[in-house]
Image (cartoon, rainbow, N blue to C red):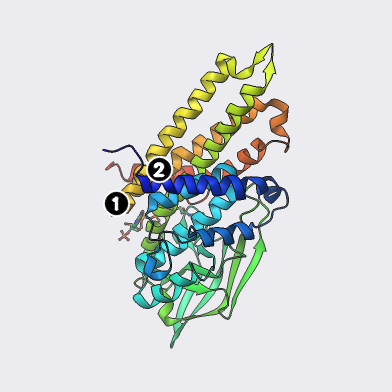
Amino acid sequence: MDFQLSQQHRFIRQMMKKFTDNEVKPIAAETDRTSTYPAETIDKLFDLGVMGMCVPESYGGAGADPLASAIAIEELSKQCASTGDIVATHNGLCCDPIMTYGTDEQKAKYLPMLTKGRKVGAFALTEPNAGSDASKGVTNAKLAGDHWVLNGSKIFITNGYVAEVFVVFAMTDRTKGTRGISAFIVEKDFPGFSVGKHEVKMGLHGSPTAEIVFQDCIVPKENLLGELGKGFKIAMATLDGGRIGIAAQALGIAEGALEEAIAYTKGRVQFGKPIAKFQNTQFTLADMELGCEAGRLLTYQAAIAKAEGRRYTKEAAMAKLFCSEHAMKTTTKALQMFGGYGYTNDYPMERMMRDAKITEIYEGTSEVQRIVISGNMGL
Ligand code: CAA
């Protein structure tokens, strides 16, 4: 068992750290304050080959492995969790299922679009009455000659109003339950597709979240992704991978908050000495460091299992659950160390705390992760 990152992964971390320090950190507060999609940063991430980085080179990607993608998301999220989220969704929830389940024709058409073509991708599963109980969506798809007709709507779609390619789940046979759900590749320009409500959120202000609507939306027959009726399995397996991305995002938030807390407590003098010299501060920082190390091991373990083609459902759920709860604890305690300053937007702590919260909710709540973990323990 080797606990060292390879030279290649260390290089990716250095590259991403440099990029994040130069391009992401300077605009992170403003991105949050103005709720602006960081379009220029995403363009630069396309230039750098990070958007769609796991896509094979033959389809315009960098041919990187899931650990490289996790490291990239982790580094970005240290300074801006919104940027980490946009990349995680694009890579894990759109490129990945097309790579895994797409036909040669689908891969040849869509993967170059999602890499060199600079089109952002999204994943559309959640509906107003189908959140944690993901199989209860009512969006349906009916075959009509050479095309499918989709009707319904999806909510809370990350990248919703900037994405051009969507992996969408719809009922093709209501009588078959989870086996009656199918997956489709939908382009934003298909007739009958529209973007609905833009969500105003507590955090992740730079990450564009929206409703998407299908009104007699015409989808070519050949855009069925994977086999008919296999959509739910595709959604679940895709979310296994997506959860590694959210684990990495949450880990990055916790690491970023820890870095800020160390710098602040070393400089902040109260009662005649830096507050980092108080044992209470030191013990709290030690717990944060411990959680980050454990979270890194869980996240990288899941990513390596995915790279090696092993089943990693439980590993991904454990990484996501642990890192998201650690991010919430760390940002809350770090903010406390900043006292009143932490509660203002002069410092990044309040943003980090708001951003951390969503990691306990999306791509499966903490409760869903516990369902998945316990469901894979042979109980
Ligand atoms: N991989 C492959 N197949 C899987 C699987 C996995 N990880 N998990 C389940 N399946 C299969 C099962 O084997 C079963 O197959 P069979 O029909 O052949 O038996 C089928 O799927 C149904 O499985 P379950 O009975 O376990 O399904 P369930 O309805 O009880 O659901 C659940 C279980 C874990 C709660 C699931 O609904 C779930 O994960 N819910 C959370 C959904 C979620 O994460 N949503 C987030 C959406 S995306 C987002 O938030 C961000 C964004 O930007 C869009």
Label 1: state its secondary structure. loop
The picture quadrant where one finds residue 294 is: top left
**Could you tell me how far apart the alpha carbons at marks 1 and 2 are, in whole angstroms?**
14 Å
Amino acid tagged 2:
Thr
Residue at left 41%, top 50%? 68
> Which residue is label 2 attached to?
299
How many other residues sit within 10 Å of disc 1, few (<14), some (14-19) or many (≥20)? few
Residue 119: image x %, image y %? 54, 68
Looking at the image, which residue sits at the far bottom?
145
Q: In this view, does 306 lie above or below 300?
A: below
Image position, residue 182 (x, y; %): 41, 70
Name the one closer to the observer, 130 or 276.
276
Out of 87 and 376, give the one closest to the viewer.
87
Q: Position of residue 378 (x, y in %)?
A: 27, 43
Residue picked out by circle 1: 311
Note whether residue 157 is visible. no
- In the visual, does 3 lie left or right of 187? left
